[in-house]
Amino acid sequence: MSEPKPRQHPVRRQSGPRPFLSVLALTAAGLLAGCDKPASQAAAPPAPSVTVAQPVKRTVTDWDEFTGRFEAVEEVQVRPRVGGFVTSVEFQDGAIVHAGDLLYVIDSRPFEAVAEQADGQLSDARAKVELAKRELDRGLNLVQTSAVSEQVVDQRRQALQAAHAAEMQAEGALKAAKLNIEFTHVAAPLTGRVSRHLVSPGNLVQGSDTGTSTLLTSIVALDPIYIYFDMDEATFIKYSKLWFEGKRPSSRDTANPVQVTLAGETKPSHDGTINFLDNRLDVSTGTLRSRAVVKNTDLSILPGQFGRVRLIGSAPYEALLIPDVAVATDQSRKIVFVVKPDDTVEARPVVLGPLDEGLRVIREGLKAEDRVIVNGIQRARVGAKVAPSLAQAPTGGKS
């Protein structure tokens, strides 16, 4: 029996690609290990730069604003006192005229004829007075010798009185005729700007004695000028309370100052004072009609224009002010961005007051040492760090 042959194990051959796969695996592992490094080791972006400023502290006074309309202090409608035909117009439409300047001329010949007739009647009346005086003197002499009776003397005395009365009537008629001649020259009753002429030469006008006198033109005084405005009831009550507390004088007995801004202007251009408050509130609007007188030396304001009236509305008080551009809106509230000591940003709700010389009054929400972002607000993020730089102290411009 033959012996069994020993079993031969097969020889395993290494394939060629295996070393290459190992290199790829090591490379991938290295890349994955690099991705596992923490993000803090990457370069962080620099903090955004902003400009900050501390609030300005100073004494301010609140001003309330109202919408008003200008009206002339004096206005007159020019009408003739006598009727007749217009012979000439002596002014330029829209020009400045002075009191006494000739405006219209009306044909005076009919009134001159009446004056001559009245002059003749006056001369006749004076002659009758002289005659009555001589007759009375003669009667007084004759009554002493009983040549005439006392009754005759009384009659002559009565005739003299009647002659004096007729003389006075003639004198009045002559004065009236001369006045009518004077009224044919229609003069400006006040200094101001005249409107256009409404009657041309050759037209017949009716005088004031007829009750339907013809309107010739109108004149308005321009310097000074009134501005009327309506004050709401709440503001009136506030002013009354300040007056009772001795913090603000009443406009009824004190000419409180006002500042007026015209349409298209950004700051007040005219100054004035309150000179009238009505004696009751309007029941339909709940407002009090008020009036200020404003200087208009340059004649730039015309009656009928609108203007914004600023009236002193409080006693002087200490306030913090910042540039108005630093105030942002967050839904229904106003906020400012404050840089804290660690240079992180905080949104601070504030209560705003009025503008004062270009700066906004902050009633609540800020302290004098706070650093408020005034430039670069769009780069600031709440809770993030910033690189603040101090701005020049804001002073504002007169508004």
Image (spheres, rainbow, N blue to C red):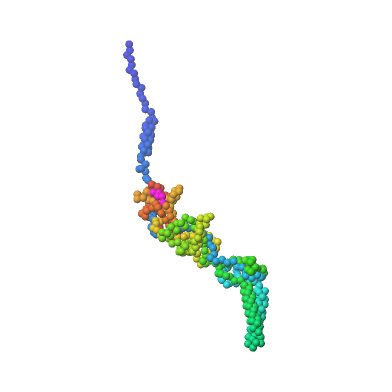
Q: Quadrant of the C terminus?
A: bottom left
- Relative to 371, say whether 150 is above or below: below
Q: Is residue 100 visible?
A: yes
Residues in magenta, as a range:
346-350
Q: Residue furthest bottom?
A: 145
The residue at the point 64 percent across, 69 percent down is: 209
Counting from the top left corner in percent of width and height, residue 169 is at: 64, 76
Whether residue 270 is visible, yes or no, is no
Residue at the (66%, 77%) spot, across then down: 118
In the picture, measured across the screen, residue 383 lies left or right of residue 130, that is left
Q: Position of residue 50 (x, y in %)?
A: 40, 52
Instruction: Give x and y (percent) for residue 322.
Output: 41, 55
Examine the structure image and report whether residue 299 is included in the region drawn in magenta.
Answer: no
Q: Give 316 or 42, whichever is nearer the viewer.
A: 316
Q: In the picture, which quadrant includes the N terminus?
A: top left
Query: Residue 365 location, x and y as percent?
Result: 39, 52
Residue at the spot 50% in from the left edge and 64% down from the top edge: 293
